[in-house]
Structure formats: structure tokens, C-alpha cells
């Protein structure tokens, strides 16, 4: 089969498309014929060697893939050859024509959802659900700010929040992105390129502030976002970060604010089961619909790793093996 291999940590140029032996499923494992694979920012951090969890070299990147079951190993009970599925974590890597995953990390893909959309579920929708419901413990009627609402996690957060009954404020940095945020159901939209967007957000809340913030880029926004929280009980969930920042702790003290970190790597089996049961229900009912911004052939994997870190995110980038 064809697969992307990384033999040394470094820039996007270390991603090499090669011929490798087909993987085989062991006991409790599922072999997936990959039809689409999602590209996530974390893939680039791992490839560069700057992420706390480093795979053994060489390795094939990619956790989020969708396709059909090619074969199953002994003791697999939930899937059979031909089933449409997506996976939220692979063993052999998703940037490939075939991938092996543990049965617990494979999930049924409703017929209404394309393989490209299925490849956009694992990290983006899993992250959004974990941030909102398992970490911030949002309540219907609260106000949520999604700063960077046009990307994969942002659109997922908006869709999940609207379905749960939150008032959603979304931001984006391009006209196209602003239209997308509106289309996903945000009640209010602000352009975070404008110097007074924080004032706009406070005006949307009548000066009260927001209850929860989904923080996509903490090293840029955390200090000013603390000042946007409601006076008591506000929470910021830190989803993304690319460096250090100085904050004024008094901004948190005066609001009795809570800052919550999160990572999908620490989600336990019960958390994972809850996430994907909820996602399946939303996909089946039509309240969740992943937005695909770019589709690229697997041979253009280097380009995909440049694009996923560029400003002006729009939906999800997927590779097609």
C-alpha cells in the first residue's frame, strides 16, 4: 500500500509518500480501507518533534480516518467487512491506504455522512465535545464564545452548542469565515481582525460578559479573553496554544474565573464512549454536519501541513488516499 512516512522530525518536507507492506489486524483490531483522512494541527506538532508525545521513528501520521472495514481480527464483535466506519485513533497511522485501529476506537459512520466528513470527526468534534461538556460542563442558556469559529473545532463547537441550547458568539478572520460561522448557527458574529471586536462581544451580552470561552489560540488571546468573562463562574477551556503569554491574574480573581486545560490524549474509555455516542446521535439527527474546506490527494500531504497552520481557517482539510 501507499503511506506517508516520517523518518526524522522536522518541517513538512520530512513527509514522504512510500510503498509499505499492508498492515494486518491482531486480536481486537480492525483493518480499515481508508477513503479520507483528516489533517489536524497536532499532526504538525508531532511531525516537528515539539509535541510532548513523540512516536517512535519511522511512523505514519494521522489519527482521524474514515472508510470501510477491510478485515477484522479475532474477538472483534461490533464490526464486519464492508461496514462504513470512522476512527478517532489509529495504531498504524491514518495517512495511508489501509490503517489498523483498536475496536474501541472505531465507530459506525451513518450513511448520510460522507467519508470526507467522517474524517473530520475524531479530533475536531471529539475536542469540541470534551471542551464543552466534559471540561466546562456547559448548561443550556449560557453564552459561549468560540474565537476562531470557522475552523474544524470551531464549527464543531458551534453546532454542538446550538443543539444544546447555548447562545453562541463566533469570530473569524475572513469574510468567507464570517459567513461560515453564521451559517453554522452562531447568534452573533464578530471579525477578530478589527481592533474593537472585544467591545462588540461585550455589547452582544449586554455588558455582562460570556459564560464560557472555547480558546483556540491561548498564547495570543488568553489575557484579553479573561476580561470578557461574566463576573462570576466564567470558564475558559484552553483547546489550542502555540507559545507563552503573560496574563494578569487579577482579571481572573475579580471574576472568580476558571481556566481549564484539555487534551484528547487524557480522555479515558468512558469519556471516549460518551463522546462518540453523542456524536453518532447528532450525525444521525442532522444537527451535526462537518464542514470540509479542502480536499487534497495524499501525494499533496506537504501542502496540507502548510495549510492547516495558516490563518483564516475554513472547515476541515482532508487527504484522499
Image (spheres, grey):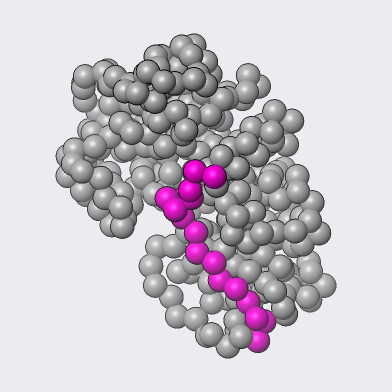
Residue 257 is left or right of residue 298, and the answer is: right
Q: In this view, does 286 lie above or below 21?
A: below
Q: Where is residue 21 in the image (x, y as percent from the top left)?
A: 21, 19
Q: Which residue is drawn at 38% across and 25% down?
A: 29
Q: Quadrant of residue 30?
A: top left
Q: Is residue 204 above or below residue 57?
A: below
Q: Which residue lies furthest to the top in this view?
A: 82
Q: Which of 235 and 173 is in front in this view?
A: 235
Residue 62 is left or right of residue 146, and the answer is: left
Q: In which quarter of the image is residue 139?
A: bottom right
Q: Which of 71 and 295 is in front in this view?
A: 71
Residue 249 is left or right of residue 5, and the answer is: right
Residue 48 is at least partly visible in this image = no
Q: Is residue 138 magenta?
A: no
Q: Position of residue 231 (x, y in %)?
A: 72, 80
Q: Is residue 133 above or below residue 231?
A: above
Span colored in magenta: 254-270
Q: Which residue is drawn at 62% across and 36% down?
A: 277
Residue 58 is left or right of residue 67, and the answer is: left
Q: Residue furthest front?
A: 75
Q: Which residue is drawn at 54% across and 45% down?
A: 270
Q: Which residue is drawn at 25% across and 45% down?
A: 55
Residue 96 is at least partly visible in this image = yes
Q: Is residue 267 magenta?
A: yes
Q: Where is residue 50 in the image (x, y as percent from the top left)?
A: 28, 57
Task: Report the quarter where the C terminus lies.
Answer: top left
Q: Position of residue 302 (x, y in %)?
A: 31, 38
Task: Report the quarter where the N terminus lies.
Answer: top left
Q: Is residue 244 above or below residue 75?
A: below
Amino acid at each position: 500500500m501507499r503511506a506517508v512516512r516520517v523518518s526524522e522530525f522536522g518541517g513538512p518536507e520530512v513527509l514522504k509518500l512510500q510503498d509499505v507492506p499492508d498492515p494486518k489486524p491482531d486480536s481486537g483490531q480492525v483493518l480499515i480501507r481508508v477513503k479520507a483522512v483528516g489533517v489536524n494541527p497536532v499532526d504538525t506538532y508531532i511531525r516537528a518533534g515539539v509535541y510532548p508525545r513523540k512516536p517512535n521513528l519511522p511512523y505514519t501520521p494521522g489519527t482521524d480516518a474514515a472508510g470501510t472495514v477491510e478485515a477484522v481480527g479475532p474477538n472483534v464483535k461490533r464490526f464486519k467487512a464492508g461496514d462504513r466506519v470512522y476512527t478517532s485513533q489509529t495504531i498504524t497511522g491514518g495517512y495511508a491506504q489501509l490503517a489498523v485501529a483498536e475496536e474501541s476506537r472505531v465507530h459506525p459512520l451513518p450513511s448520510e455522512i460522507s467519508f470526507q466528513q467522517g474524517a473530520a470527526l475524531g479530533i475536531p468534534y471529539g475536542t469540541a465535545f470534551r471542551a464543552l461538556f466534559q471540561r466546562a460542563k456547559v448548561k443550556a442558556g449560557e453564552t459561549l464564545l468560540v474565537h476562531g469559529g470557522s475552523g474544524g473545532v470551531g464549527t464543531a463547537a458551534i453546532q454542538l452548542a446550538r443543539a444544546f441550547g447555548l447562545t453562541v458568539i463566533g469570530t473569524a478572520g475572513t469574510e468567507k469565515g464570517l459567513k461560515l460561522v453564521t451559517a453554522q448557527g452562531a447568534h452573533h458574529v464578530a471579525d477578530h481582525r478589527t481592533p474593537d471586536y472585544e467591545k462588540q462581544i461585550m455589547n452582544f451580552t449586554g455588558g455582562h460578559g460570556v459564560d464560557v470561552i472555547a480558546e483556540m489560540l491561548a498564547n495570543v488571546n488568553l489575557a484579553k479573553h479573561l476580561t470578557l468573562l461574566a463576573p462570576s463562574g466564567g470558564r475558559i477551556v484552553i483547546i489550542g496554544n502555540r507559545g507563552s503569554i503573560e496574563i494578569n491574574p487579577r482579571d481572573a480573581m475579580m471574576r472568580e474565573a476558571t481556566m481549564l486545560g484539555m487534551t484528547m490524549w487524557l480522555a479515558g474509555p468512558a469519556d471516549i464512549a460518551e463522546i462518540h455516542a453523542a456524536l453518532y446521535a447528532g450525525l444521525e439527527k442532522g444537527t451535526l454536519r462537518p464542514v470540509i474546506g479542502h480536499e487534497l490527494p495524499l501525494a499533496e500531504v506537504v501542502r496540507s501541513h502548510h495549510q492547516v497552520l495558516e490563518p483564516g481557517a475554513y472547515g476541515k482539510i482532508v487527504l484522499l488516499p
